[in-house]
């Protein structure tokens, strides 16, 4: 966890500061979810598309705040309104209950005039990338795609709901957790399910890495 926090701090120094604000959102199940919001930088008369971005590790307030600033800021510069939810139980957004809270969050945020209705983009880092894949499997028709930087997948899980679904996957070649060793397994599981997959290993990159926007931007244009 300390290593993850250090890497996030270093990445923050590489990007311009973005304004983010923490909000408390009332959900349909009677609970409240704390969320860091980063507003789209583009000024238009049209509502901005929504991106749900989930941080790594337990998805706590510190990690979510840092994620909203360095990666959320990059998406906001490209016209997305970004919401980075804080896990209510330090379990990221894994599992049915936490998956459901993200779905409820989307419903509440899309009631705002500044946020577009319709399909939403999911993104996540590490445990957050795994959460994004779980949420997408539940109702893929509700989402534009998933940016998983990084994430893992296995054929033990039923990935067939993601047939034809766009996924952008990157894993660091020098991943300290050994995730690069499971790249082929992950690609195989998703490809077998018919996923529209854009996947690559980043040479010498660690578990947490600086986003390669030159690679991601064309993919975002396609799904946006």
Image (cartoon, rainbow, N blue to C red):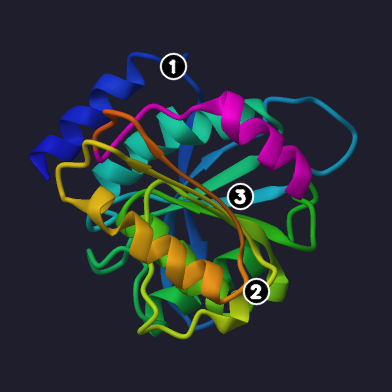
Residue 43, relative to residue 56: is it above or below? above
Who's the residue at 66% across and 66% down the image?
165
Between residues 169 and 78, which one lies in front from this camera angle? 169
Q: Tag 3: Cα neighbours inside 10 Å, few (<14), some, or many (≥20)?
A: many
Residue 178, relative to residue 161: is it above or below? above
Disc 2, SS: helix
Who's the residue at 75% across and 25% down the image?
42
* Region of the chain picked out in magenta, as a range: 207-224
Who's the residue at 61% across and 81% down the image?
161
- Determine if the magenta segment contains residue 122: no
Mark 1 touching mark 2, by CB under 8 A? no
Q: What separation in Å lies between label 3 and label 1 (alpha carbons)?
A: 19 Å
Q: Which residue is mark 1?
A: 15
Residue 158, relative to residue 167: is it above or below? below
Quadrant occupied by the N terminus: top left
Q: Which residue is mark 3?
A: 51
Between residues 158 and 26, which one lies in front from this camera angle? 158
**Horizontal and vertical percent for residue 154?**
36, 74
Q: Quadrant of residue 99?
A: bottom left
- Determine if the magenta segment contains residue 220: yes
Q: Which residue is mark 2?
A: 140
Disc 1, SS: loop
Residue 4, relative to residue 194: is it above or below? above
Q: Residue pushed farthest left?
A: 2
Q: Tag 2: Cα neighbours inside 10 Å, few (<14), some, or many (≥20)?
A: many
């Amino acid at each position: 966890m300390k290593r993850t926090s250090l890497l996030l701090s270093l990445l923050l120094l590489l990007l311009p500061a973005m304004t983010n604000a923490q909000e408390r959102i009332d959900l349909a199940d009677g609970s409240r979810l704390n969320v860091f919001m980063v507003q789209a930088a583009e000024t238009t008369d049209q509502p901005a598309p929504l991106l749900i971005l989930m941080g790594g590790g337990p998805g706590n307030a510190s990690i979510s705040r840092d994620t909203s600033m360095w990666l959320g800021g990059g998406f906001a510069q490209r016209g997305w309104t970004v919401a980075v939810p804080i896990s209510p139980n330090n379990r990221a957004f894994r599992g049915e209950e936490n998956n459901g809270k993200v779905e409820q969050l989307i419903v509440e945020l899309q009631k705002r005039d500044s946020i577009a209705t319709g399909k939403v983009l999911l993104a996540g880092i590490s445990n957050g990338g795994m959460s994004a894949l779980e949420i997408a499997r539940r109702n893929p028709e509700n989402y534009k795609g998933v940016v998983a930087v990084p994430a893992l997948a296995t054929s033990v899980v039923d990935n067939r709901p993601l047939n034809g679904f766009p996924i952008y996957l990157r894993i660091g070649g020098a991943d300290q957790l050994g995730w690069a060793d499971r790249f082929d397994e992950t690609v195989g599981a998703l490809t077998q399910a018919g996923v529209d997959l854009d996947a690559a290993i980043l040479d010498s990159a660690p578990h947490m890495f600086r986003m390669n926007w030159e690679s991601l931007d064309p993919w975002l244009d396609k799904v946006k």
